[in-house]
Image (tube, helix red, strand yellow):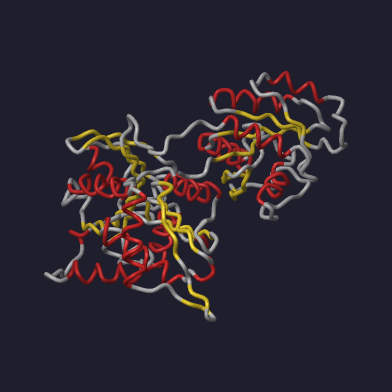
């Protein structure tokens, strides 16, 4: 499953970026003693007690006055709050409780999200600031946690509270909302038009102006193939073309939508051909481990087609997206509805493949046959010994292979084992994750 998302929010200049840098272990956020330095949303990853967490650093929530920058920062913070699983609400222990803190607290309570109130700049070890207990007046269910973002003290207690408040997530994301499908792609590739065609009504704005859709919008569809929730995401531009902060945050929302989806539809504009940016967008779904379908839209608008046009276009896609040969390719027209109804069958197919489980006994029969057909590699006279394999997860299907020496398990042999799994079990439309672990020479 995708990483839980934790957003750090609060008024300007309370130390959010310093805490963010401390958590991710690098100085990615600009830290200056000036309110409003962090305008764009910045995200990174950290790990605590074996859990990977996505952390978002937000601009300070200031008064909603006429200042354009402050109003955009507030808007971004509100979007971050909406996207987060847990919110770290940071206050300044030296300044004490101020009216702006109460305003932010009211916003957080309205969100309904779990909140961990954090009092920063508690730098004196073993002694709390004089005004620390004022922060209990904020009225959250969780007691305030004293931290020093500069030294890192107290951050362990803070992260413990975050983990405690994380909502439970089932292994399969399918619920009353059905299969969750994220539609991702470049601006103007036809994502909104596709969802409107699927839903049979104008559910999202359709425009020829790239970047119209800034938020992720859910559309629930029920038909003879089942229940599906489609998420239309903002088009992902090249990084160098992301000029304003809202556009920057839309990329994060698209990434988050892909990570939380069961299936990704990767939209490609047939009239533009396959581009480098399409490859980067497809990489988002691949790295997230999501089952994927490559959807070539506007196929009706492509002139001078012949009987081999689809074959040639497919070959170009396979070359450009060589890292995901497992993803099926469909040629559609959101405008006319050509082959759009067939998407539902394919979505069900790739989803079922992504959650398929294989028994350990069956896996090891396939593994034994694979090792017999192609002997494991040797290095400096030492041969790789492969003991056994077991499946540990789904979405993506995850397998742990135990061997005598992990460094001998070369990439080429890993790819060979993956191909054997696909030959025997299919796994069409989904990436596979192979984890190699060492055991003793006797396999124990």
Quadrant of the drawing holding the N terminus: top left
Horizontally, is 220 left or right of 240 in the view? left
Horizontally, is 127 left or right of 248 in the view? right
Kindly give the residue lying farthest to the left in the view shown: 307
The residue closer to the viewer here, 404 or 21, is 404
Identify the residue at horizontal 30%, vertical 67% (top origin).
Answer: 317
The residue closer to the viewer here, 2 or 364, is 364
The residue closer to the viewer here, 284 or 183, is 284
Count how many numbered circles sit on residues in the image.
Answer: 0
Identify the residue at horizontal 42%, vertical 59% (top origin).
Answer: 283
Kindly give the residue lying farthest to the bottom in the view shown: 380
Q: Quadrant of residue 54?
A: top right
Q: Position of residue 130 (x, y in %)?
A: 87, 25
Horizontally, is 46 left or right of 371 in the view? right
Q: Position of residue 290 (x, y in %)?
A: 38, 50
Kindly give the residue lying farthest to the front in the view shown: 442
Q: Position of residue 20 (x, y in %)?
A: 67, 46
214 lies above or below 330:
above
97 lies above or below 43:
above
Q: Quadrant of residue 70?
A: top right
Identify the residue at horizontal 72%, vertical 18% (top origin).
Answer: 137
């Amino acid at each position: 499953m995708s990483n839980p998302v934790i957003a750090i929010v609060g008024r300007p200049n309370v130390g959010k970026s310093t805490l963010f840098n401390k958590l991710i272990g690098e100085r990615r956020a600009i830290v200056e003693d000036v309110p409003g330095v962090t305008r764009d949303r910045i995200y990174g990853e950290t790990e605590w007690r074996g859990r990977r967490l996505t952390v978002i650093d937000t601009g300070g929530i200031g008064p909603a006055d006429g200042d354009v920058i402050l109003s955009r920062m507030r808007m971004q913070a509100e979007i971050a709050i909406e996207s987060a699983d847990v919110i770290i609400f940071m206050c300044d222990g030296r300044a004490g409780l101020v009216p702006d803190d109460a305003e932010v607290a009211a916003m957080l309570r309205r969100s309904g999200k779990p909140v961990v109130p954090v009092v920063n700049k508690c730098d004196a070890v073993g002694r709390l600031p004089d005004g620390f207990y004022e922060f209990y007046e904020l009225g959250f269910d969780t007691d305030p946690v004293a931290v020093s973002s500069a030294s890192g003290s107290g951050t362990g207690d803070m992260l413990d509270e975050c983990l405690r408040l994380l909502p439970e997530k089932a292994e399969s994301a399918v619920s009353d909302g059905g299969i969750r499908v994220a539609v991702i792609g470049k601006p103007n590739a036809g994502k909104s038009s596709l969802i409107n065609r699927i839903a049979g009504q104008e559910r999202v704005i359709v425009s020829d102006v790239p970047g119209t859709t800034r938020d992720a919008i859910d559309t629930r569809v029920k038909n003879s193939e089942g229940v599906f929730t489609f998420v239309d995401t903002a088009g992902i531009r090249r990084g160098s073309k992301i000029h304003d902060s809202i556009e920057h945050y839309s990329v994060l929302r698209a990434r988050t939508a892909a990570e939380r989806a069961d299936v990704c539809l990767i939209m490609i504009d047939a009239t533009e051909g396959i581009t480098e940016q399409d490859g980067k967008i497809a990489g988002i779904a691949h790295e997230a481990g999501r089952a994927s379908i490559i959807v070539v839209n506007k196929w009706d608008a492509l002139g001078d087609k012949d009987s081999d046009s689809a074959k040639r276009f497919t070959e170009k896609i396979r070359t450009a997206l060589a890292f995901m040969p497992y993803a099926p390719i469909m040629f559609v027209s959101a405008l006319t509805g050509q082959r759009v109804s067939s998407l539902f069958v394919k979505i069900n197919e790739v989803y079922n493949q992504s959650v398929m489980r294989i028994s350990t006994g069956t896996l090891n029969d396939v593994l034994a046959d694979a090792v017999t057909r192609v002997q494991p590699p040797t290095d400096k006279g030492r041969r790789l010994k492969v003991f056994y394999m077991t499946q540990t997860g789904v979405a993506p299907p995850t397998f742990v292979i135990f061997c005598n020496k992990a460094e001998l398990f070369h990439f080429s042999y890993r790819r060979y084992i993956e191909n054997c799994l696909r030959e025997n079990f299919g796994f069409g439309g989904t990436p596979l994750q192979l984890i190699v672990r060492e055991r003793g020479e006797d396999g124990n």
